[in-house]
Image (cartoon, coloured by chain):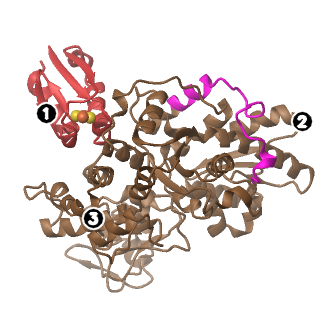
Chain colours: A brown, B red
Amino acid sequence: MPEINEITKIRRKVLTEIAQMTFEGRLQTDVENILQSVVTDEGPRYRCCVHKERAVLQDRIKSALSQPMNSTIPEAAAAALDGNIAPAPIIQVLPVACDQCPLDRFIVTDACRNCLAHSCIASCPKKAISVVANRSFIDKSKCVECGLCKRSCPYGAILEISRPCERACELGAITADKARKAVIDYDQCVHCGACKIACPFGAISDRSMIVQVIQRIKAGRRVYALLAPAFIGQFGVQVRPGQVRASLLKVGFHDVLEVSVGADAVAVEEAREFIERTKTKGGLMTTSCCPAFVGMVEKHLPSMKENVSSLVSPMVAAAMNVKKNDPEGIVVFVGPCIAKKSEAERYPGIVDYVLTFEELATTIVGAGVNVTEMTASEFASAGSKDGNIFAKAGGVLQAVENVLAQLAPDVQVAAERCEGLGNCKKCLQEIEAGKRSANFFEGMACTGGCVGGPGVLTDSRVTAKLVENFANAAPEKSAVTNPNSEPLETLGLHRHHKTSGAADS
Amino acid sequence: MLTVELCMGTSCHLMGVQDLVAVLETLPAEQREQIEIKGVTCFKNCGKGPNIRINGELISNATPDRLLEILQANLA
Ligand code: FES
C-alpha cells in the first residue's frame, strides 16, 4: 500500500464526518458543513480554486451516500438516511473530479539525436513524423498511437505516457473519451478497484453504504459484522482481534463473526468438487472466492467459465450461515475488497451490505470509539488455520491442498496460481491453449491476495505475516475437522443453485 | 535525547500515522539511538491527525516530510 496521500485523507475525512453526523442524528441538517470543514478556505489547494474543490467534494459526498450524482446534497442525505441505495455502478468516475489528463500518448524527448537513420520516420505508417528544429516531431493530428516509432528508435528517445487509471486497469476497461474524461466500460470492468487507487486526482470512487448500515444499527436491528480473514492488523499492527470485536460491539453491532468459518466450508467443498472433476471430466478447475477474478473469467474468458469452481465465496457461505440462524438479522460483510460490493448484489437478502476496512474504521471513529483504547476480550479464531490463510495469496491453494491430503491423498494436484488480473488472464489463456498444464488454479485479482486489496488500512507486507501468525495460532488446525464450520449440505453452497427458504427473508 | 510520541489511535491510524512510524524505522542507527519512541492511544485531538508529540510539543496534521525536518533539525 502506498503512503496515505492527501486524496486518501480527504476521502476518509468525508466518510468519518458522515458517519459521526449519522450516529449523532444530525446528518440531514449538517451534511453541507462538510463542504467547509474538509475543504477549508485557507487551503491547502489541490485544484484551481476552492469552488472547484467543493464541487468535487459534493460528488464525493454523494458517492459516500450511495446516491445519484444529479441529486442535491440534502436530497442525497435524506435518501441515504431512509436506507436507499441508488442503482448505480459500484465504481464510478466522479464527473467533476476527473482532470481530463491531457496526455499525448507518445512524445519525443531530448534524447532524440536527429540521427541519419530516422527509423521513426520510416516506421510511421501514417507519415506523422517529420524533423522540426533538429528533432523528430509527431504531428498529433495524424498520429494513431500505434507505437511503432517508439519501438524503432535505437536511442529509446520516444516515450510512451499513459494515464494512471488506464495503466492500472489490466483489463482495458477504462479509457478516455473524446473530451479526455475517463470512462469505464462496465462490460469489461470487474470492480477490482485498481483505477481508484491509481488516480492521483481521486476522481474514481466506489460508493459506500455506511449511512445505511448505521441507520440499521440505530433502528435496533440485529446487525452482524462478518469480518474477512484479512482483518488482522488492519486497525493497527498492535491491535488485538479482541479489541476489534469489542469496538464493533460498542459501535452497536449485534455480533462479530469471522468469514474464515465460511472459508473452511468452501475449502472442503472445493476439494470435493475437484475430486469429483478428476473422476469425471478432468481438466482445469479454478478457485471462485475472488469476485474480481471470477468476473474476469466471465467477461474476458467466457470459454473458461465452466472451469471456475461452482462454489459460492466464503462471504456468501458465512452470510448464509447467519441467515439460517437469524433470518431477521442484517449481514454486513467487512473486507478489503470493492468487488465484493458488486458480488453481494447477486445475493440479495443474504449479504445485505458490504463495507471495506476503511469504511468500517471511519464508522468506528464516527461512533466515537477508539479501537486502541478498548480492553481486548478473549479471541480465538472460530475458523481453522485453512480458512484463515485464505486472506493471503497462495492461501486458498494451500487450504485446498491440505483438505485434499486428508480426503483423497491419491489425487494428483498440478497447481498454478497468479496474482493480478492481467497475470491471471494470461496464465489461464496459456493453460487453455495447452502451453501450460495445470488442473488447479488459484486466481487473485490483487497483488498479495486479499491483504493487498483496495480497502485495506495497513501495508500488505506487514499484514500477510500477521495473517499467517493468526492462522497458525487458530485452535482448529483443519477445515475438515472444524466443528464451527457448518455442514455444507445444509447451506446450498453452489453458485448455480437457486437458494431459497431462510435466505430470502 | 528526543522523545517522539506517536498517536496510534484509530483516527490517527486512518490519517496515516504508520507512514510516520516508517520514517522513524528507516533512520540510520546512530540517529535512532537518540530517539525515544512511544505509542499513545489518543491525544484528544482526533480531527487533526495524525498527531505526534516531540519533546512535549504537539504536532497535528503531521506528515513524513515535516517529521523528517524536525528530526534533522534536532538530531546530531
Ligand atoms: S486518535 Fe490520535 S488524537 Fe485521537
Tell me the residue that label 2 is attached to: A410
State the residue at coordinates (43%, 58%). A212
Q: Which residue is at the front of the view, A500 or A100?
A: A500
Tell me which corner region of the image, top left, top right, bottom left or bottom right, holds residue A166.
bottom left
Q: Assign a secondary structure to mark 1.
A: strand
Q: Assign a secondary structure to mark 3.
A: loop
Residue type at mark 2 is Asp
State the residue at coordinates (72%, 45%). A266
Residue A160 visible: no
Residue stretch in magenta: A465-493
Asked whether mark 2 lies closer than 8 Å to ligand 1, one says no
- Is residue A345 left or right of B66 when viewed as pictured? right
Question: Horizontal and vertical percent for residue A452?
Answer: 48, 44
C-alpha separation, residue under disc 2 versus residue under disc 1: 62 Å
Q: Which residue is at the front of the view, A76 or A398?
A: A76
Query: Could you tell me if the residues under marks 2 and 1 are in contact, i.e. CB atoms within 8 Å?
Result: no
- What chain letter is assigned to the residue under label 2? A
Question: Horizontal and vertical percent for residue A313?
Answer: 66, 51
Tell me the residue that label 1 is attached to: B59
C-alpha separation, residue under disc 2 versus residue under disc 3: 60 Å
- Numbered tag placed on residue A109 in the rendering: 3
Residue depth check, mark 1 versus mark 3: number of the one nearer the observer: 1
Tell me which corner region of the image, top left, top right, bottom left or bottom right, holds residue A71.
bottom left
